[in-house]
């Protein structure tokens, strides 16, 4: 008569082991009772597609006045033979609260062997693990206990821990327990500073404990301490020693219903789980070499997370009694065996499913008899072909997904940065997205409002005391939108560090609010006689293009200090040029104009440090109605012998144009035809504000081209053109060559004339030598002031001639002492030291001088 029954399932070498504990009572009603532990070996039959019993075994135990239970079962290595065997932990509870535990081994002959037993005055309930030995490990009262077949004595580890998340073997370390405990901050200074602060913040830490060597392992090798508050279980997928360093890959499930992938202690991916209360995770490697993570939930649900290019839920099932991983169908790879709950059938394997989420897919209740198998050879060839195609398809899919993830990440970062920048300059508090919105793991309770210190800091950072924005304007030239910011004369910062950004004020979720634009810097003299560039030009220009119609005059000014304080006469204008068509797609768009620059702070003995400044210049509004009405069009008209137009119109035309300079040399004839060509055939008139620059009114493509003609002597001059494109340039040159004398030589100037560039290089080299010499002299003088000589007070060495000192013994002693002092001074002068601030200042000056020389050489090589 069957009174009670317990069942446990275990996979072993492709078989399903079913352990059943049954308690029988004699028919006579005597007090003698026997508890039988039965095992059945079940194997999957590929012909019938069902599980069949291969063999069975029984282990009998006396059960008088005892309550016997199966605690757990697992596979562990027998240290005597090195063979992995099924292990079963049994519990016998007596009436006097003494609990006896028994560990059994199951051999291939279905014979049970009692490995060892031990007694406790409490029941095992928390973090019970079976591992190599066989050994048993458990946690009780925040302490770790273990017993093995070798010691047969319960031992305690000298650690305090609140949970055990993993137990396994690690090369050169043996059996390692990964647990979570209260953080104990080290007193020594050798510990990792970041790890220490991390533990101090979270109050808990990960740590590994090697049982055989009784050695503590650093927990950050597995994962950061910050995750100790959310991780509930871990599965270590890969552990190896490379170049004497431990490399670990693992997955962890959290109380936040997430699965996280860690590589060498750093999170590499996260996946939201479909159900609540995950409690264990294991892995499976399928026939297509896919790594599957099988997550079990306390509610009886199962889900499989696939790791290819990212972590994603591949499949899920409900109402599952147990899930096992092994090669059940004999394909050489692993499959999942799902045992479903079925109250209507007493057979434990009546409702099952075998799958690897690929080719293998068997389920109970399906009739396979009518399946006609194809020819064996064709089936094998077809299988190989499909596998090859799947591999190629998967490789392409992985590349596409990687690219999509990369682009998506860049887009999210740009969008969030734009929002933060707009909030900063408008003195609004920026609220960061939650961890769940970003697909990350939340390590603390979400806080609705950010800390007050952050908002205060942002508010202070946006308040810039400088007021050097004089005017903001906009123009439409052809297909381009030109935004200009006129700087006041009090602007003293380097123009090479000034740029503009255009950000759409609307919240567009599908596009980036940053408007791609090209920055240009234009400086107009007060007399409007020339357009010149800031003296801090850097070649080759990475982003800013600076206009210079009189490069010769500008180059003759010499090379001032790079990024030094610039004090130039006249107004300076920073211009941003962007394409107009994408903005018109919104019909009406409002943009924020931001100016970025750098400010030098003098600290630590005149050492310069850059401080980035962002200034809100204003907002511009662009609409189709305004553009159709010509509100922002350029209005340059011909008035008698002059060309009229506002400064903004002139700057807008120059900003959208491309500059080309040509050196024209004639050995036999003067170059008077050039002026006649400009004023006659090209129908040019000079600007009223700056006479040296003339505007072309000729109908056709060349209309709107700006020219500048400068004569060095009657036989040599420089012609500079500002034209819309290369087609206009070739038309102008073609027209010019027809009026020039045949012996003229026309050469494109890339950076300026050779004479001016040679002079510029000489000045730069001279400055470099002077900077090096002055720097070392400054160093020597500062070092000498810091040195103290060991002269005795009151004994001043006389400057008397050497001959007079050698006349007497006292003079000889003075001369010897003076010689010794000079010798010591010489040694000290050769071993002078300097502080770090002085060294950085000298190095910065020398490097800046060398950069100026390199720029001059680069320009000269391009001429």
Image (spheres, helix red, strand yellow):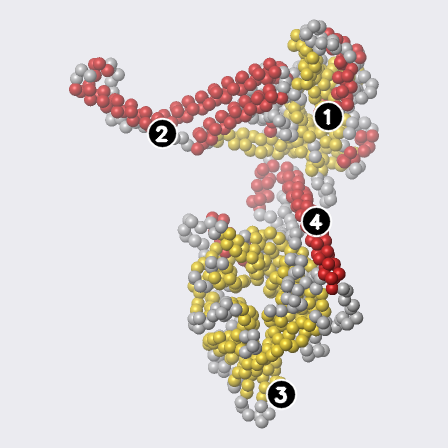
Q: Earlier in the sequence, mark 3 or mark 2?
A: 3
What mark, if any, has residue 656 been given in the picture? 1
Q: Are marks 1 and 2 in contact (CB under 8 Å)?
A: no
What mark, if any, has residue 1 been given in the picture? 3
Q: Residue at the location (59% across, 58% down)?
A: 251
Q: Residue at the location (76% across, 36% down)?
A: 582
Residue pointed to by mark 2: 831
> How far from the left and from the top, in percent, is residue 473?
72, 27
Can residue 795 be seen in the rendering of this structure?
no
327 left or right of 104 in image: right
Residue pointed to by mark 4: 396
> How far from the left and from the top, in percent, is residue 775?
45, 24
What mark, if any, has residue 357 been given in the picture? none
| Cα–Cα gap, marks 1 and 2 | 59 Å
Q: Which of marks 4 and 3 is nearer the N terminus?
A: 3
Residue at the limit of the structure toward the front, as seen here: 377
Closer to us: 186 or 764:
764
Disc 4 versus disc 3: nearer the observer? 4
Q: In which quarter of the image is the N terminus?
A: bottom right
> How far from the left and from the top, in percent, is residue 551?
64, 17
Near mark 1 (Cα within 10 A), the count class, few <14, some 14-19 or many ≥20, is many
Q: Earlier in the sequence, mark 3 or mark 1?
A: 3
């Amino acid at each position: 008569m069957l009174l009670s029954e317990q069942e446990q399932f275990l996979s072993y070498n492709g078989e399903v082991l079913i352990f059943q504990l049954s308690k029988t009572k004699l028919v006579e009603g005597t007090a003698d009772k026997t508890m039988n532990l039965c095992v059945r070996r079940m194997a999957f039959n590929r012909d019938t597609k069902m599980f069949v019993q291969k063999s069975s075994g029984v282990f009998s135990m006396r059960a008088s006045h005892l309550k016997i239970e199966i605690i757990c079962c697992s596979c562990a290595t027998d240290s005597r033979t090195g063979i992995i065997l099924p292990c079963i932990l049994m519990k016998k509870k007596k009436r006097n609260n003494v609990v006896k535990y028994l560990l059994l081994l199951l051999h291939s002959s279905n014979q049970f062997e009692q490995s060892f037993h031990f007694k406790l005055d409490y029941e095992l309930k928390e973090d019970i693990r079976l591992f190599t030995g066989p050994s048993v490990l458990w946690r009780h009262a925040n302490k770790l206990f273990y017993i093995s077949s070798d010691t047969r004595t319960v031992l305690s580890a000298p650690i305090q821990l609140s949970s055990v998340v993993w137990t396994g073997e690690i090369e050169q370390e043996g059996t390692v327990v990964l647990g979570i405990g209260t953080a104990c901050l080290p007193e020594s200074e050798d510990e990792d500073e970041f790890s220490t602060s991390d533990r101090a913040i979270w109050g808990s830490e990960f740590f590994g404990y090697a049982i055989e060597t009784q050695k503590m392992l650093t927990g950050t090798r597995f994962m950061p301490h910050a995750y100790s508050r959310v991780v509930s279980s871990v599965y270590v997928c890969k552990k190896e020693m490379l170049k004497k360093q431990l490399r670990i890959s693992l997955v962890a499930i959290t109380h936040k219903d997430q699965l996280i992938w860690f590589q060498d202690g750093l999170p590499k991916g996260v996946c939201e789980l479909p159900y609540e209360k995950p409690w264990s995770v294991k892995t499976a490697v399928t026939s297509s070499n896919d790594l599957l993570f099988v997550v079990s939930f306390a509610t009886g649900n199962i889900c499989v997370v696939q790791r290819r290019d990212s972590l994603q839920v591949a499949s899920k099932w409900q109402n599952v009694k147990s899930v096992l991983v092994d090669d059940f169908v004999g394909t050489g790879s692993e499959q999942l065996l799902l045992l479903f709950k079925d109250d209507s059938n007493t057979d434990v394997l009546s409702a099952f499913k075998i799958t690897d989420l690929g080719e293998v897919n068997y389920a109970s209740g399906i009739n396979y008899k009518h399946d006609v198998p194809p020819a064996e050879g064709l089936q094998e060839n077809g299988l190989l072909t499909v596998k090859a195609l799947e591999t190629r398809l998967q490789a392409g899919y992985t590349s596409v997904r990687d690219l999509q993830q990369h682009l998506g990440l860049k887009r999210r970062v740009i969008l969030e940065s734009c929002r933060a920048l707009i909030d900063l300059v408008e003195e609004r508090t920026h609220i960061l997205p939650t961890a769940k919105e970003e697909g990350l793991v939340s390590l603390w309770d979400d806080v609705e409002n950010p800390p007050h210190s952050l908002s205060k800091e942002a508010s202070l950072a946006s308040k810039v005391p400088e007021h050097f924005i004089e005017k903001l304007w906009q123009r439409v030239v052809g297909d381009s939108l030109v935004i200009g910011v006129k700087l006041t004369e009090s602007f003293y910062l380097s123009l090479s560090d000034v740029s503009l950004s255009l950000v759409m004020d609307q919240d567009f979720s599908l596009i980036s609010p940053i408007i791609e634009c090209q920055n240009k810097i234009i400086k107009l003299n007060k007399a409007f006689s020339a357009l010149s560039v800031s003296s801090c030009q850097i070649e080759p220009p990475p982003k800013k293009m600076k206009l210079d119609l009189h490069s010769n005059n500008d180059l003759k000014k010499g090379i001032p200090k790079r990024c030094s304080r610039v004090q130039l006469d006249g107004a300076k204008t920073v211009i941003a040029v962007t394409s107009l068509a994408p903005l018109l797609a919104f019909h009406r768009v409002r943009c924020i104009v931001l100016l970025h620059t750098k400010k030098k702070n003098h600290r630590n003995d005149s050492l310069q440090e850059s401080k980035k400044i962002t200034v809100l210049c204003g907002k511009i509004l662009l609409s189709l109605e305004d553009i159709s009405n010509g509100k922002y069009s350029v209005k340059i008209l011909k008035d008698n012998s002059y060309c009229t137009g506002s400064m903004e119109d002139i700057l807008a035309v120059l900003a959208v144009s491309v500059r080309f300079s040509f050196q024209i040399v004639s050995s036999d004839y003067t170059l008077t035809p050039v002026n006649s060509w400009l004023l006659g055939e090209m129908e040019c008139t000079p600007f009223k504000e700056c006479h040296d620059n003339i505007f072309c009114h000729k109908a056709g493509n060349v209309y709107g081209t700006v020219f500048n003609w400068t004569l060095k002597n009657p036989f040599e001059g420089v012609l500079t053109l500002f034209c819309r494109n290369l087609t206009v340039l070739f038309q102008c040159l073609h027209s010019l060559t027809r009026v020039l004398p045949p012996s003229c030589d026309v050469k494109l100037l890339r950076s300026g004339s050779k004479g001016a560039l040679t002079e510029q290089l000489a000045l730069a080299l001279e400055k470099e030598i002077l900077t090096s010499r002055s720097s070392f002299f400054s160093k020597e003088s500062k070092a000498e002031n810091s040195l103290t000589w060991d002269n005795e007070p009151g004994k001043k060495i006389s400057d008397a001639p050497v001959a007079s000192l050698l006349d007497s013994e006292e003079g000889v002693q003075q001369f010897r002492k003076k010689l010794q002092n000079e010798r010591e001074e010489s040694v000290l002068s050769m071993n002078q030291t300097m502080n770090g601030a002085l060294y950085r200042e000298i190095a910065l000056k020398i490097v800046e001088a060398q950069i100026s020389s390199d720029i001059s050489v680069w320009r000269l090589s391009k001429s």
